[in-house]
Amino acid sequence: MMMIININDLMGFGKLQDIKEELIVERIEKLKEKKNAIILAHNFSKPEVRAVSDVVGGSSGLTTGANETDCDMILICGVNFMAEMVAVLNPDKKVITPGRGGVCPLAKQLSYEELLEAKKEHPDCEVLLYMNSLAKTIALADCVCTANNALKIAGTMGDNSPILFGPDLGVSYYISKGTAKDIISIPDYAVCPVHNKISVDKLTDVKTAHPQATIVAHPECRPDVQDMADYISSTGEIVNFCKESGKKEFIVAADVELSHMLQNEVPDKTFYPVSESLVCKHMRISTLVNIVDALETEKPEVVVPCEIADAARIPIERMLEFS
Ligand code: SF4
């Protein structure tokens, strides 16, 4: 009588999954070598995606990574404005993004037309845009900035008139508080739907439970949440701060993935997320499977029309020069 053996019973389902993942990772490494490709991933990407990436960082780290590579192909795991930024900085390389590509809801909140209108209304103002903007809109700006370099870049602008800044009210507040510059927010309602969910009440609950913990926050948080924080900066700078700080416990007012990442990287300290449900699903679209697919098919390709890319490159390069 023939006996049917189920491989899952022999190995345990979890173990089989591990082997499957190992094979996928091996395939990704081979494809990267064959195509002379690198992978860039945002800090909020899934951990297994970060593990196969050559550059992991916030918008600032990814911009530098995209600007300094001499590979032939770049695969970007993040959202649309990051993919566009990589394509703008690398017109001679193939840029691809896995899955159908994440769309940042914040970047959609400032349209080209709205910025054009604001520039007409305030002809003397310089325009600084948060990197979380679409390339077509960035093409109208004088400079862009990330959470990491916003204060430094804004400090070089707006000496004689207010700075037109968009699209995030949290970052607007962070800049005006940190530089004492006059800021006109465009539009006057745009927020990151993930970081804006963090309320003072929720943060107070976590602080009450862990009174000794240091609060670190992303500048996309609401102004009243920023006012409660001990340290505010980009994801990359929050990681550095927590590693270098003499403190042992931190409350992380940002996407929960940052707390998880910190806990892994700094196991001798403790990180409390404000809520486990603070997840940017747009940043989680990349998976190991769709990375293999994108590298094999070299699709979907990120294409920014030439005239937009040429114009958007100027404010992005200006930021790189200043930072
Ligand atoms: S965390 Fe906020 S700003 Fe960042 S991609 Fe998600 S929605 Fe956009």
Image (cartoon, helix red, strand yellow):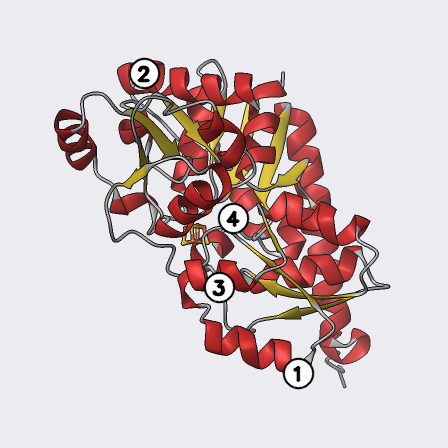
Please name the residue that numbered disc 2 is placed on.
Answer: 311
Please name the residue that numbered disc 1 is placed on.
Answer: 209
Q: Name the front one of labels 3 and 4.
A: 3
Judged from the image, the secondary structure of the residue bearing numbered disc 1 is helix
Rendered position, 98 above or below 259: above
**Residue 6 appears in the picture as rendered:** no
Please name the residue that numbered disc 4 is placed on.
Answer: 290
Q: What is the spatial separation of the Cα atoms under label 1 and label 3, in whole angstroms?
A: 17 Å
Q: Name the front one of labels 4 and 1.
A: 1
**Residue 68 appears in the picture as rendered:** yes
User: Residue 184 falls in which quadrant of the image?
Assistant: top left
Of 274 and 165, nearer the camera is: 165
Is disc 2 surrounded by few (<14), some (14 to 19) or many (20+) residues within 10 Å? some
Please name the residue that numbered disc 3 is placed on.
Answer: 225
Q: Name the front one of labels 2 and 3.
A: 3
Give percent across and percent down for residue 163: 32, 31
